[in-house]
Image (cartoon, helix red, strand yellow):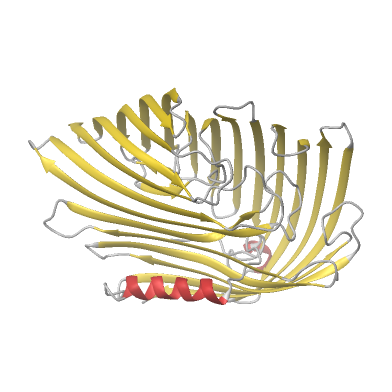
Amino acid sequence: MDKDLSPITIKTRLATPTTIARSISLALTIFGCVSLHAAQYQYALNTQVEDSNNITGQLGGDEGEAYSLGLSFGLDSFQLREWDIDLNGQISSVEYSEDSLQNEELYDFQSTVLYKPLHSKFTLLTLANYGQVPINRFSTQEVNNVRDERAWVMRPRYYYSMTQTDRVNFEYTFFDYYLEETDQPVLGQNSTNVTQSFLVNYEKQVNPTNSLSLNLKTSETEYDESEVNAIDYDRDDIFLRWVMRNSTNQIQIDLGESDIVDANQQELKQDLQVVSISRQINLNNSIELAYSNSFNNQLNTNENTNTVSVNQQNNFSRVQVVEEYSLNFTHDDSIFDFTLGFSDSEIDQVGSNNTEQRKQGSVGLTYSLTRLFNNGSRSSVRINYIKSESEFDTSFTAIAANEIDNYRIAFNYAFSSNFQISLEYSVRNTIQQNVDFTVNEIDTESTFINFIYSDRGRL
């Protein structure tokens, strides 16, 4: 695990005492079960000062400053025969000079634990995500626009071997999702729910790199009683899955159909199409392509990379059809790093005319200054550009479209292997168009100075 801890990517986040207690309790539970003498860790302490001509990020906002103190951390197991453990998170506190803003305590914590006992056909996967999402996902405002989000997943799995190449897999998933209620009107943006599902499949290992499976899955989703206009539903999926893995390519393709019957006895049908391709072009270049068209899934399961993640598009109280494309390209060498990303998603809420379309593109450049300063590769210049465009045709908001351009340039200087300083300049331009054809333009310029102490090692 070698996640980037440079100051341009560390965002200020701090947990409330209750949340910290839950996180510590979860960590102790995990660590009490296994020996972590074979684990690697990393952490970074970050102090940041921001000076902005519009600290609120709102129309007509005033100049101001933000002062932050935070910690980011990570822990990854290795050489543990029966356990795969990955923990990481960020906690920090932000204080604003503008009296109209509330100081913020923000946090983000993720935990993945896979228990795979030796000489057993049983495995147990648990996920825990504790973080925050926008109160109003249609708004371009970032400051004072967050609320708590929690997701917990338990997935036991067992397989029965018919032959050396044929087996049947049985899988149960329990998904508990919580979204904090707020005093602000957020119609159609709440989705606290519990989903239970059961999957059985017949899997054929065609050769050492290819496998085929026929999958049957049934699930039920029940929303919290306090969710206004939420509609519970049952879902059945049937699909074929092809997975291919070798030293340079990982491919997963799912093709099938989904049937949903909601609490109003309305029956819905939708094709299920998922394509995921990862290719290591050469030593320095890799590319990832993905396409999906299906009912929205609360969990994204990628068999070719052996990863499971919580879908961030969960703050909806009904069934949606989501069509999404994404592309990511990475070049990484000792001097020059380059990243390119693009995503396009369309979300249609079933049983209504509510539609959202979101596009985002990003470019990142990092140039190492090791030859100039002769202090390793930690000193660098980084340039990032992110552009997003969104269109809304929904009764949930009076906003019709958003456009956001964000430019960032940072100079990072390493005084030592543990301590570095960063100077960053950022420009954020937003254009918001309302349904009454009024347009709000907000241009924000900010300067940041970061002091970071970091370390990594093995337990």
Residue 369 location in percent, x, y?
Answer: 66, 61
Q: What is the total number of numbered labels drawn onto the structure image?
A: 0
Q: Is residue 334 above or below residue 66?
A: above
**Residue sitting nearer the eye, 213 or 19:** 19
Residue 455 placement, left or right of 184: left
Q: Is residue 146 above or below residue 207?
A: below
Q: Is residue 380 above or below residue 310?
A: below
The quadrant of the image that shows the C terminus is: bottom left
The quadrant of the image that shows the N terminus is: bottom left
Residue 182 placement, left or right of 418: right
Residue 251 location in percent, x, y?
Answer: 37, 33
* Observer able to see residue 415: yes
On the image, which quarter does residue 16 sit in?
bottom right
**Residue sitting nearer the eye, 114 or 440:** 440
Give me the residue at 82% from left, 32% from top: 435
Give me the residue at 55% from left, 35% from top: 327
On the image, which quarter does residue 77 sit in?
bottom left
**Residue sitting nearer the eye, 80 or 257:** 257
Residue 252 placement, left or right of 65: left
* Observer able to see residue 3: no
Residue 354 location in percent, x, y?
Answer: 64, 30
Residue 56 placement, left or right of 218: right
Residue 223 location in percent, x, y?
Answer: 48, 47
Give me the residue at 34% from left, 58% from top: 126
On the image, which quarter does residue 349 sit in?
top right
Give me the residue at 73% from left, 55% from top: 142
